[in-house]
Image (spheres, rainbow, N blue to C red):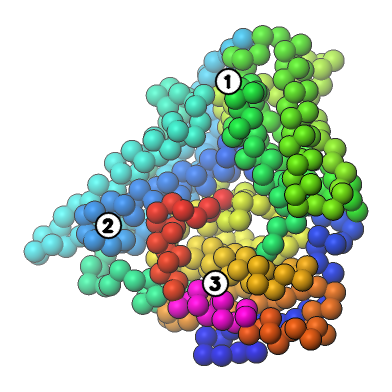
Amino acid sequence: MSGKKNIYVNGINQVPVPKRQIEIVERKGIGHPDSVADGVAETVSESLCAMYIKEVGHVLHHNTDQTEVVAGISAPKFGGGEIVKPVYILMDGRATTYIEKDGKEVSLPVESTALKGVRKYLKKTYPYLDIDSDVILDTKLGMGSDDLTGVYKASNYLSNDTSFGVGFAPFSVTDELTFQTERYINGALKKKIPEAGQDVKVMCSRVGKDITMTIACAMVDRFIDDPTSYKSAVEDLTKFVQDFGAGIIDKYGDGENLVVDVNTGDDYERGVYYLTVTGLSQEMGDDGSVGRGNRCNGLITPFRPMSMEATSGKNPITHVGKIYNVLSTMIAKDVAKKVKADAEIHVRLLSQIGHTISDPLNANIDIINENAADSPKLNKWKDEAYEIAADWLDNIDKVSELIINGKIRTF
């Protein structure tokens, strides 16, 4: 099925991932070094967008998706350790640094805007990180001027690349467990277990109906007096997550069995504990890069289609590597809600450089279940999926606006 927007919808007879024997899902939490890099890059982009709109009236060209987090050195200990060498964060990339106005060059506060936004983000997100002494922030943003004659409307822009974005829906119970557990540990659970830091990684392995959740959680040394206190905190964390996971299974699952393992790398006999000063492993040994962690739906899903494209930090107006990954996920969610029927929806959007953002070269939607291609409802599903995709593409400016306003997750 195709149309004026090159939208193709297919029914595929295949067992959806949630019904297969094996499934693996991962989420790197907000404090993982790769997520720190993603968060910083996206904050720089959001800050620049706000500045450009204030100064010029619309977003100017920028791509700040090259942030690097270089690990420091720390000396954690029970009762509270110290940072020996601060973490180094480099915000590099391209940005419009000046405009031509009345025949003169007018500089724009690019680097100061980036630094101000990132400092605010780090303070809000990582409460145990001392911005003045635990981290060094550096900016290398530069490019030049940009043409101000364009209209601020994403759909009018030509694609800046021949690239693709992918998305899927709905989440399986394994997806929900992985995604929501990290948010729980870094959210409501902090009031009960302040010892738990922000660097939390959740990995779920499902074999049949047996799910093993492995959690790595950096523990904050200032809240832990001794090994006994550490063990108690880990045991409490395990119990709370076990109970929380049971609720997720009751809501989204089908009687799956859940086993939760926390900090399996610890070795109490040898005195090995996942102990940190700041609750972040970047303080000693772990580096981070943009795009090396979660996809824009917040997960890493080796059993589902994924793009290698880094989403965080890219321009939300012209960069298809960002817009199409976000948009494909939104289309997949809407189609899944409409089709239901235990179907898995895969969406792939391909741009062609020189074509408008709203006119992909190929928009492919796969409706997947055991009998999708033979279902008497397939033609109805195709029409509904086509209309959903066409409507989103006709209103692609809304996607850019949501990203600019910080209402869309990019990691």
Disc 2 secondary structure class: helix
Q: Main secondary structure of the magenta part?
A: helix
Whether residue 40 sits left or right of residue 146 in the image: it is right
Disc 1 secondary structure class: loop
Where does the magenta region start and end?
384-394
Whether the magenta-drawn stretch holds residue 357 is answered as: no
Whether residue 249 sits left or right of residue 201 in the image: it is right
Determine the image quadrant of residue 286. Answer: top right
Provide the residue designation for mark 2. Answer: 53
Across and down, in percent, residue 59 comes to: 31, 61
**Looking at the image, which residue is at 40% across and 47% down?**
44
**Looking at the image, which is closer to me, 198 or 160?**
198
Determine the image quadrant of residue 78. Answer: top right
- The amino acid marked with disc number 1 is Val
Q: Is residue 295 visible?
A: yes
Alpha carbons under labels 3 and 1: distance apart: 41 Å
Alpha carbons under labels 1 and 2: distance apart: 39 Å
Provide the residue designation for mark 3. Answer: 163
Provide the residue designation for mark 1. Answer: 277
Q: Is residue 77 visible?
A: no
Across and down, in percent, residue 186 comes to: 60, 34
